[in-house]
Amino acid sequence: MKKKLLTMVLSAAMVLTMLAGCGGDQAAGASGSGESQSAGASGSGEEQPADGSGSGDSMYRVLYSSEVSSLNYLTTATTNEYQIGANVIDTLVEYDNFSNLQPGLATDWSYDEASLTWTFTLREGQKWIDHTGAPVADVTAQDFVDAMAYVLDPANNSATAGNLFGTIKNAEEYYNGLAGEEGAAKIDFSEVGVKAVDATTLQYTLANECPYFLSMLTYVCFMPAYGPQLAEQGTNFATTADTMYYCGAYYISAFEPQVQMILTKNPNNWDAEHVYIDAIQRTYNAEADTIGAEMAKRGEIDQTTLGSDIVDAWMSDPATSSMVSMQRPKIDFDYFYCFNFNVHKLNEDFYRDGMTGYSIDEKYEPQNWEIAVNNENFRQSIMHAINRTSTVYISTGDYADPANYIQNTITPAGFAVDEETGKDYTEQEAFADIVSKDFFDAAAAVSYKEAAMEELAAQGVTFPVKTLVRYNPTTTNWEEECVVLEQQLEGVLGTDYIDVIVEAGPADSFLTDVRRSSDYMLLLCNWGADYADPETWTDPFYQSANGDGTYNRGMRYAYMAYAIEDNTASADTVKEYFALVEAAKAITDDTAARYAAFAEAESYLIEHALAVPYGVTVSDFVVSRLNPWEGQYAAFGVSNLRYKGQKLYDAPVSMEEFEKSAAEHK
């Protein structure tokens, strides 16, 4: 029964996303950090009527187990922190629950193709408010300019500044000049392509033609901030609830780290009539995932995720079966295995530090790995030895049909559809031999192994090749999945060839200390789309050239450009992939040709095992008094994190109600 439900829900999501693609919408996303949200909470509040009319006071209560490390939406790069910014700061445009692009802080906009300039007219009278709800000042065009200047100041260490590079005129040049990059000339910020013509007229001048620009505008790096406060607070901006101002559907009225956060409805918001929940009470509890189900059953919290270990019991018990529904399916994240092409030390800016040592402990023989990973037969042997249908991530969710989760492409099916042809991006001819293929092939893996051993032995590689696999100990089932991966690789390829070493990373700052610090050899990574175009899925891999033989670091996933800089055996392969991406990016006036070109680049990436596709997120079963189909939605980004438009019902949404809403969104 549950497999049938999930199949239905995913199919509905596919149709919805295709409609979204046809609407020419989309926007923000996550940086690929993928920090998840926990749900549930304690507290009280009058329940809202089942019609969601918004009458009376309504308090939505949730638990969370992972505290935010920052409230600063201009610098953060985690979903956990995006959720706060998404609800307290409005953007120029937004999306409705059918993924249609809608006016936000901007009422209308126009584009001048000759000058590559977008002009936006802002709403008059929208206020900034403080943490007490008191109005402070009008939101003006200058607030978007000041916020971008803040993002592009290297001193503020914004993790999303790179999203402006190559999009906003001179954004990268200005940033590099301030950062003191070698050969970079300092320019004045007035040369950056953002301008406040007057209080309600904002202009962005693009660096290049960008067919998906509107879809970028709900990403955090395009959010406004009150300039005088930025100047006054400096590095203290958004460190507490009273060191930032708000212009979104909610404001932070109380925040005590590792205790609780309360988001209160902003009565001054331009669209307050469509904000139906009066307050969100987020209560910290490190055991939220463990205690949430029982608290939800007792009505003490309004949402929680049900673990796969109790779903069957809840579904078969008449007392609880009507309380169970599902999350709205999301295809804004994709998962894949990355090979680390750079195990040398990195400095604080994530660049190589003169090759003075290795980012991986010498006991793991990083110099041996460095040669092996640049051998395509070695990578192919690993790719074909991974049996994705038996990994713990899937098998622990026994309700999930692996066929609905596994993806053979990096770009998820349904993410992008050519409006004219109606063809899904993953149906491009370049993927013909990929999408239906089962990469797991033990015989092929052994064949690749034999070829790799002969080639690598001639280069001085010793066997078995130690392969360090890291995991975050706070992520449910990740350790178990890595253990299964070790059994698969060593079982198929033999311990004479590979020695998989599973090791926990730090519970805190895993991304910084492991992935961004190049402290892994093989790692399951994820990426969230930032805008409505296949180009967004190249960010973890593609690195642009600086013109001096070096490459920009990209999003610091696989460091493939070092294969070129070090002239390794895979240098030409990586060069070709980069060239294919660049050719696709250059096509801006023909969607069909652009998608075909990106598909060619992506298929090349996969065919040469530069990365191993894995799957998309499985929708969780939940107990929730919110109907997720009523909230804002886009197949990427922060729209999915907003409470605006959602209504708090008297009782948890049932599966029948969930399915009815899903059908209405086909």
Image (cartoon, rainbow, N blue to C red):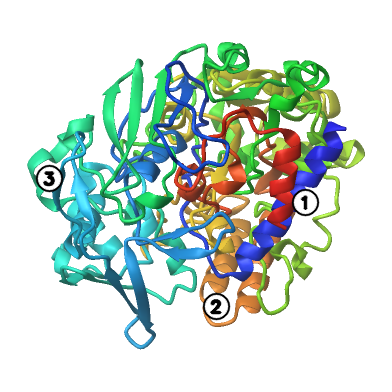
Q: Seen in the image, is 305 located left or right of residue 245?
A: right
> Where in the figure is residue 577, as x and y percent of width and height?
60, 61
Residue assigned mark 1: 11
Q: Which mark is residue 229?
A: 3
> Looking at the rendering, which quadrant does residue 240 occupy?
top left
N-terminal of the pair, mark 1 or mark 2, is 1
**The residue under label 1 is which amino acid type?**
Ser
- Compared with residue 640, is residue 396 higher up or lower down, i.e. above or below? above
Figure quadrant of the N terminus:
top right
Q: Amino acid at mark 3?
A: Gln
Q: Quadrant of residue 138?
A: bottom left
- Is residue 363 visible in the rendered structure shown here? yes
Q: Amino acid at mark 2?
A: Ile
Q: Position of residue 620 (x, y in %)?
A: 67, 32
- Measure how far apart labels 3 and 2 are at the Cα level: 41 Å
Q: Nearer the viewer, residue 30 or 11?
A: 11
Label at residue 587: 2
Image location (x, y in percent) of residue 17:
65, 58
Labels 1 and 3: the sequence-earlier one = 1
Answer whether labels 3 and 2 touch (C-beta < 8 Å): no
